[in-house]
Amino acid sequence: MKILAINTAGKETILAIELDGKQYYKRVEFAKHSETLFPILEKTLSDIGLELKMLDYCACVSGPGSFTGVRIGMSVAKAFCYSLKIPLVTISTLELLAFGKKKEDRPVCAVINAGSGLVYHQMFDLSSKDSLYAPRVDTVKHLLGFLHANYNDYLYFVYNDNSEKVAIEDFGKNSPYSAEVLLKLSKEKIERKEFVDPVTAAPLYLRVSQAEQLLGKKSELRRASLDDIDDILALEGQNDEWDLSWNEIGIRQSFDNPSYRCFLYFIGDQAKGLVSTLMLGDEAEILRVVVENSVRLQGVASKMLSELFIKLKEEGCQKVFLEVNNQNYPALSLYQKLGFQEMNRREGYYGKGEDAILMKKDITN
């Protein structure tokens, strides 16, 4: 069996090759992938006597990681598989990190520094080879709160700094990507026939750049009606860990209440956020704040709520109230920045030591 595996998702260019039972590994530190990948690949194949046309399989790392690096490695692997008509397998950097850990008595949470205060993460059960949740991107505080609430801190961490200058102490020392684990996972996926289409295979980015998502697109907060039920359900169906999504029956019943207000936040022609309230005289209670996953942590919630306050003031509202889980760090930080003040606290309201914080904001100014 002849396998070529490529990893350009981090600061190193990594090649892992299996040639008729023998393994060969090549790692170049601090590589500029666009300039180094082909020369390194050509020399390595020449040194071991392997020609591209002899390959049986190709594998590549699909991210998350360096946007440009991932594209380069995937493009090369996809081109080889398409032209040679051989199968392609993809491996995420989070899998690569997690399955390099040898202990199996606890789940392993793979964490990669995404920059700008964000981390990519995913948890795995090494004994069963199962993923315990889909790959995510969060702030460090949000991740720690999420793990504490759902996994009671019973886990191991494995961390990669992804060439970012500032390491994150919560997750320990940097763990580089392993060429040996890359080849091992490639072979396992080949044996299970977990092949992907080389034409449609796409990088695992988890987030798009703020410029790509928001720049040049008009944004607007619009009053919603039942005609917008599909957009509302799509936003509610994201399985937010902090509360239960509203179902269609509950949403439809809410619109029967004359005090109910639902707004959708559009970026271009796509609904990317939702906020709903109850109007009670000159006061309003915020019931739901939902932001679509692809634009989270990009200021959408702040803009959406700022526009909401303007619309509520036009209806004579003077004070806004809400309730938030004290472990929901991103939401709590956002509300504090917007001027909400803690009024009261219901200790242990959500269980697992999680309190409900009642907050208030005066919007008369």
Image (tube, grey):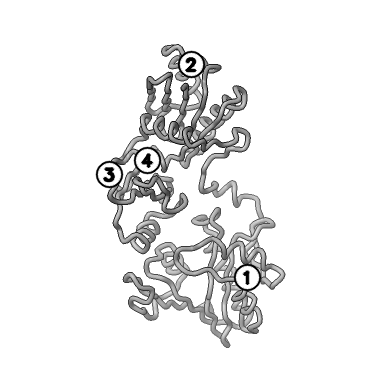
How many neighbours does mark 4 have within 10 angstroms: few (below 14), some (14-19), or many (20 or more)?
Answer: many
Q: Quick one: SS at disc 3?
A: loop
- Counting from the top left corner in percent of width and height, residue 308 is at 58, 71
- Viewer-side label of 2, 3: 3
First reached walking from the N terminus: tag 3 or tag 4:
4
Amino acid on which the number 4 mark rests in the picture: Leu
Which residue was labeled with disc 3? 103
Label 3 vs label 4: CA separation?
Answer: 13 Å
Which residue was labeled with disc 2? 42
Amino acid on which the number 2 mark rests in the picture: Glu
Q: Quick one: SS at disc 1?
A: strand
First reached walking from the N terminus: tag 1 or tag 3:
3
How many neighbours does mark 1 have within 10 angstroms: few (below 14), some (14-19), or many (20 or more)?
Answer: many
With respect to residue 200, does 270 lie above or below? below
Which residue was labeled with disc 1? 263
- Viewer-side label of 3, 4: 3
With respect to residue 208, does 336 lie above or below? below
Task: Choose top left, top right, bottom left or bottom right for residue 113.
Answer: top left
